[in-house]
Image: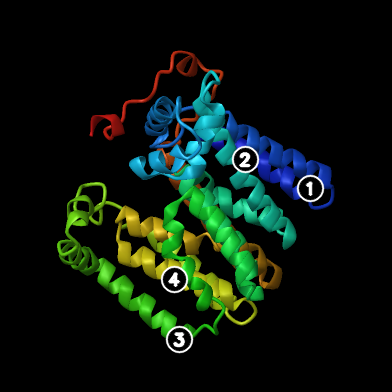
Amino acid sequence: MLFYSIVFFVILMLLYIGKRYPFVERIGIFVLLFLSVCRFDIGNDYDNYCYLIDYSIFLLKDADIRSLFYVSSFFGLEPFFELLCVIFGDFQYHFVYVFAVYSILTILIWYKLLRDINGVFEGFFLIITMSYLFMSFDQIRQVLAVTLFVFSYKYIKQQNWRKYLGVILLAFCVHYSILLVAISYFFLNKKPYIKLYLCVILLLYIGFRLNFWHQFRSSLFSLVGIYSDYSQNDRQLLSGSFNSGLAFLFQILFYSYLMIVLRKKYPLLANSLFIGVSLLLFSSGNLNINRIAYYFTFSSIMAFPLYLKQEYKKIRVYSLLFLMIIYSGRCIYTGISGCVPYDYIGSENFKMLNFRIREYRLENI
């Protein structure tokens, strides 16, 4: 916790100073990239990805580029992942390069988005404190796709469906789940009905506290045939222990508050946050639905800097920043996404390829 706190403080200080000195800002981004690229065994799925990378390289060794789609379909992964396996397959420690590419692309796209609204420090403050960075360490494929989806928001606002479709197709090569949210192009930019939204959120929260949505999903998934077994396993039904305390309530209130204050000037972001909050409440810990919610809650990366620009009451800003820091400390303390403690590629664990013991390993299925 001390390590992450010091490193994050240094990064944020550099980004803050970078408001006046752009060169310092770039140093802060470089430190963040270095932290991300040089990590080892950080993330719950890190060792599973290493296994998938090795197996993909084995299958693709004598295959041509057309086999990318076959292998992707076989694994349920995507062409971009398999392409990286081809490019780095002959490198020693090839998995490090695959992780590095995902981190570099994700962080640089965030940087581009936040530079466009002059909110680099504020945006990365949220990325760090709300643990989006830790999610990107673990869910490398989907977080890159989510980031591309947020990037496409400007084309939704412009009603430029050709460029929007181009970004969606690019994200599709990164993670197929983008297709589940692509249709939002047609309604994200509509006028938000905040009173209706708040009523829906309240009803969803009551259902969440009563465990209604957990039972409803169980009944619904039982009708889906082959999907029912997967949806009912322990990793998909965690409503009794996941997202049930003050930290989850803070998330819901935080996104809802941004939705309310941005509804007039930024209706697209308000609508996105409403969908994200609704999916979070309905999911009640179901990993599949929870991760679909990320496509919309990550819009807070754009919403938070824009909110700070229009908020004139400093007590609200300072209170919110304080709560976000508390939330960040709680996430680090609990070891969110398997990212604590930090380990890097110069350690003895890396040299010995000594991975942490995990209960869930793909190769044991």
Mark 2, residue position: 104
Q: Are marks 3 and 2 in contact (CB under 8 Å)?
A: no
Mark 3, residue position: 195
Q: What kind of residue is marked 2? A: Ile
Residue 275 - label:
4
Q: What count of labels does the image hold?
A: 4
Q: Is residue 239 above or below residue 364?
A: below
**Nearest to N terminus: mark 4 or mark 1:** 1
**Nearest to N terminus: mark 2 or mark 1:** 1
Mark 4 is surrounded, within 10 Å at the Cα level, by few (under 14), some (14 to 19) or many (20 or more) other residues, namely many
Residue visible at 64% across and 32% down in the picture: 34
Q: What kind of residue is marked 4? A: Ile
- Whether residue 343 is visible to the viewer of this picture, yes or no, is no
Mark 3 is surrounded, within 10 Å at the Cα level, by few (under 14), some (14 to 19) or many (20 or more) other residues, namely few
Q: What kind of residue is marked 1? A: Gly
How far apart in space, not on screen, are marks 3 and 2 (Cα)? 40 Å
Residue visible at 53% across and 49% down in the picture: 144
Q: What kind of residue is marked 3? A: Lys
How far apart in space, not on screen, are marks 2 and 1 (Cα)? 20 Å
Residue visible at 51% across and 37% down in the picture: 65
In front here: 310 or 267? 267
Residue visible at 32% across and 73% down in the picture: 204
Residue 246 lies, in percent from the top left, at 38, 58
